[in-house]
């Protein structure tokens, strides 16, 4: 049974109770697909120490690479907001697109036609089998939020993104906004 609350384009904000999980602790995930067979998303606030030129030497750019999730971390994925430049991309929602012709993308980056505010690269993705994400929602692992940033989320700074989302939720979540990442070390 597919949840009507979950839709591609939504943000999944990790509940503060997710502690000790390196991938998902304080994660914000952009849900890229959600259907009866499962769900796919990308963690948008966990930059890695690599740039695109570290992984693809023929690209001359220092765009950060993000940890998209624990699945297929040897594969590179990207989202962008310029479908008119990148053929064969698939719309997620709100003017955010997934993938497309990578050869064209490389050429456009090298020519300066694409900036870091237009594209974000990920190693791996997050994935859930049929009903798995719904079960995690019932277990209070995730908070669903609308993506109010629309396609500008691609250029959004990630340093404090989880904290910003928790503050926006308000109420009982406010206490967590200043808590250390591992409260056991407090």
Image (tube, helix red, strand yellow):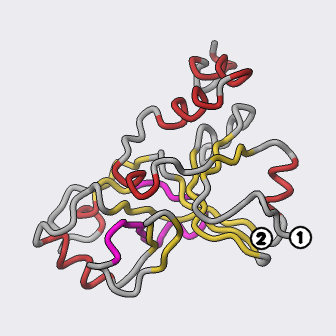
Residue in front for this viewpoint, 5 or 61: 5
Q: Is residue 132 left or right of residue 75?
A: right
Residue in front for this viewpoint, 14 or 124: 14
N-terminal of the two: label 1 or label 2? 1
Percent across and percent down for residue 5 are 76, 57
Look at mark 2 in the image and give the residue it sits on: 129
Range drawn in magenta: 66-83
Residue 17, by quadrant, is top right
Percent across and percent down for residue 74 are 48, 70
**Residues packed near mark 1 inside 10 Å, few (<14), some (14 to 19) or many (20 plus):** few
Which mark lies nearer to you, 1 or 2?
1
- State the separation of the CA atoms marked 1 and 2: 12 Å
Q: Residue furthest left?
A: 111
What secondary structure is found at the residue carrying circle 2?
Answer: strand
Count of picture labels: 2
What secondary structure is found at the residue carrying circle 1?
Answer: loop
Residue at the location (73% across, 74% down)? 35
In the picture, the quarter occupied by the N terminus is bottom right
Residue 33 painted magenta: no
Residue at the location (31% across, 71% down)? 82
Q: Residue 1 has which mark?
A: 1
Residue in front for this viewpoint, 83 or 175: 83
Residue 56, by quadrant, is bottom left
In the picture, the quarter occupied by the C terminus is top right
Residue 120, by quadrant, is bottom left
Percent across and percent down for residue 57 are 20, 70
Which secondary structure class fits the magenta region best? strand
Q: Is residue 119 left or right of residue 30?
A: left
Residue at the location (35% across, 76% down)? 83
Q: Are marks 1 and 2 in contact (CB under 8 Å)?
A: no
Q: Is residue 140 left or right of residue 18?
A: right
């Amino acid at each position: 049974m597919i949840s009507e609350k979950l839709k591609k384009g939504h943000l999944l904000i990790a509940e503060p109770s997710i502690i000790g999980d390196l991938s998902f602790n304080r994660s914000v995930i952009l849900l890229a697909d959600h259907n009866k067979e499962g769900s796919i998303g990308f963690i948008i606030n966990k930059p890695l120490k690599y740039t695109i030129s570290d992984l693809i030497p023929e690209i001359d750019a220092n765009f950060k690479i993000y940890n998209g999730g624990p699945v297929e971390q040897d594969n590179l994925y990207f989202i962008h907001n310029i479908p008119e430049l990148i053929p064969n991309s698939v719309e997620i929602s709100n003017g955010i697109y997934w993938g497309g012709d990578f050869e064209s993308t490389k050429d456009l980056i090298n020519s300066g036609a694409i900036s870091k505010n237009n594209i974000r690269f990920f190693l791996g993705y997050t994935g859930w089998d049929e009903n798995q994400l719904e079960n995690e929602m019932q277990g209070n692992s995730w908070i669903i939020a609308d993506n109010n940033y629309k396609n500008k989320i691609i250029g959004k700074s990630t340093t404090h993104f989880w904290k910003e989302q928790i503050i926006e939720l308000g109420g009982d979540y406010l206490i967590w906004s200043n808590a250390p990442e591992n409260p056991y070390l407090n």
